[in-house]
């Protein structure tokens, strides 16, 4: 039911890419990961000052096994002084998982 509601959101870009909120849903369910990557890249291009999209991009890269690229983005976010507290906590959790052995 949630997925159907999110599918009703406008698509992104001229090729009809996923809306970033639908991409977040798919990422949590490990579906459409390449499309999620494109959606978060697009959102980041449109809102370069919004750290949420950099975090989501790093998360989807981790799910796709691109740990090095994801860690680079996470480290960049770690250095941002004005990160909202909720994103800071999420970043710390994701960063801990990214660098944890095994």
Image (tube, rainbow, N blue to C red):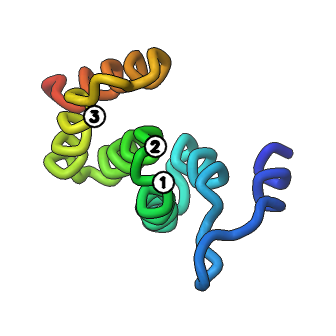
Q: Which residue is drawn at 62% across and 65% down?
A: 18
**Could you tell me if the residues under marks 3 and 1 are in contact, i.e. CB atoms within 8 Å?**
no
The one nearer the camera, 56 or 34, is 56
Whether 98 is drawn above or below 86: the answer is: below
Q: Residue at x 26, y 27 (%)?
A: 95
Which mark is first along the chain, 1 or 3? 1
How many marks are shown on the rendered structure?
Answer: 3
List x then y, in percent, for residue 19: 64, 60
Distance in Å between CA atoms under marks 3 and 1? 15 Å
The one nearer the camera, 80 or 31, is 80
**Could you tell me if the residues under marks 2 and 1 are in contact, i.e. CB atoms within 8 Å?**
yes
Q: Name the residue under label 3.
A: 77
List x then y, in percent, for residue 6: 77, 53
What label sits on residue 50 in the rendered view?
2
Q: In which quarter of the image is the C terminus?
A: top left
Whether 26 is drawn above or below 77: the answer is: below
């Amino acid at each position: 039911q949630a997925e159907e509601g999110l599918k009703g959101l406008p698509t992104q870009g001229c090729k009809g890419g996923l809306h970033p909120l639908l991409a977040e849903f798919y990422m949590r369910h490990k579906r459409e990961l390449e499309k999620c990557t494109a959606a978060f890249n697009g959102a980041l291009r449109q809102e370069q000052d919004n750290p949420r999209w950099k975090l989501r991009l790093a998360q989807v890269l981790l799910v796709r096994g691109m740990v090095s690229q994801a860690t680079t983005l996470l480290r960049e976010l770690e250095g941002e002084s004005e990160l909202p507290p909720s994103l800071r906590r999420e970043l710390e959790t994701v960063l801990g998982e990214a660098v944890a052995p095994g």
